[in-house]
Amino acid sequence: MSAIRLRPVTESDLAMFHRFATEPGLIGLDWSGYRDPHAADRRFAQDGYLGPDSGRLMVEADPDGVAAGFVSYVAGKYSGPIGYWEIGIALLPQWRGRGLGWRAQAMLCDHLFAHSPVQRIQAGTHPENIAEQKSLEKAGFTLDGIVRACEFRAGRWHDGYLYSRLRTDPAPPL
């Protein structure tokens, strides 16, 4: 199992973001059609992907410091003054199935809980993505339930699974 760390996005990482926007299937079930690859450049120029309401951190695998993918976060709100974070992950295919995903998501949760007052972090996945369901559970998430018809993909609406980790939930050992 490779050691990993999270780090801010650098300009050299933008080529990976371009690939995720233009290579069908590279992002797995989350492919939702071609996207503007230069949107990544504009966002990086704006705030380096470290905005107050959304951002990305690179998942770097040791010992070579290779960028294996990224984790993302976006603010959401149900009610009240303090909202929640919704997180996601995208790993390049050669890094999947190595235990990086659950650890990166757990590390992102630790980071977000340490630097924001939110009580809840949530993540969605596809019912057919068993690997991500196991990853989220290893990262300390609990299945909240099914979100019906929440995603339009491949020409039709699909259900999703919603997971959450609360600040008061025990953090998994890394």
Image: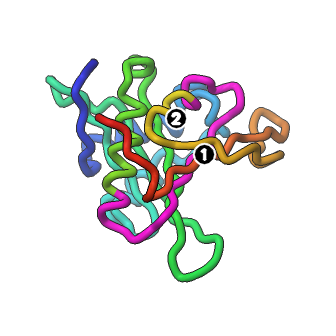
| Extent of the magenta region | 112-133
Disc 1 is placed on an element classified as: strand
Residue that lies at the very extreme toward the left in this rendered image: 63
Q: Residues within 10 Å of mark 2 (few under 14, many from 20)?
A: some
Task: Name above or below for residue 100 compared with residue 74.
Answer: above
Does the magenta run of residues contain 127? Answer: yes
Residue that lies at the very extreme toward the bottom in this rendered image: 81
Residue at 43% of width from left, 21% of height from top?
A: 96
Q: Which quadrant of the figure has residue 102?
A: top left
Q: Residues within 10 Å of mark 1 (few under 14, many from 20)?
A: many
Residue at 52% of width from left, 35% of height from top?
A: 137
Does the magenta run of residues contain 11? Answer: no
On the image, numbered disc 2 is attached to which residue?
137
- For marks 1 and 2, the one nearer the N-term is 2
For residue 163, the mark is 1
- Residue 68 lies, in percent from the top left, at 33, 29
Task: Name above or below for residue 99 compared with residue 41.
Answer: above
In what quadrant of the picture does the C terminus appear?
top left
- Residue 21 lies, in percent from the top left, at 52, 39
Q: Is residue 134 left or right of residue 6?
A: right
- The answer to whether the residues at label 1 and label 2 have Cβ atoms under 8 Å apart is yes
For residue 8, the mark is none
- Residue 10 lies, in percent from the top left, at 24, 48
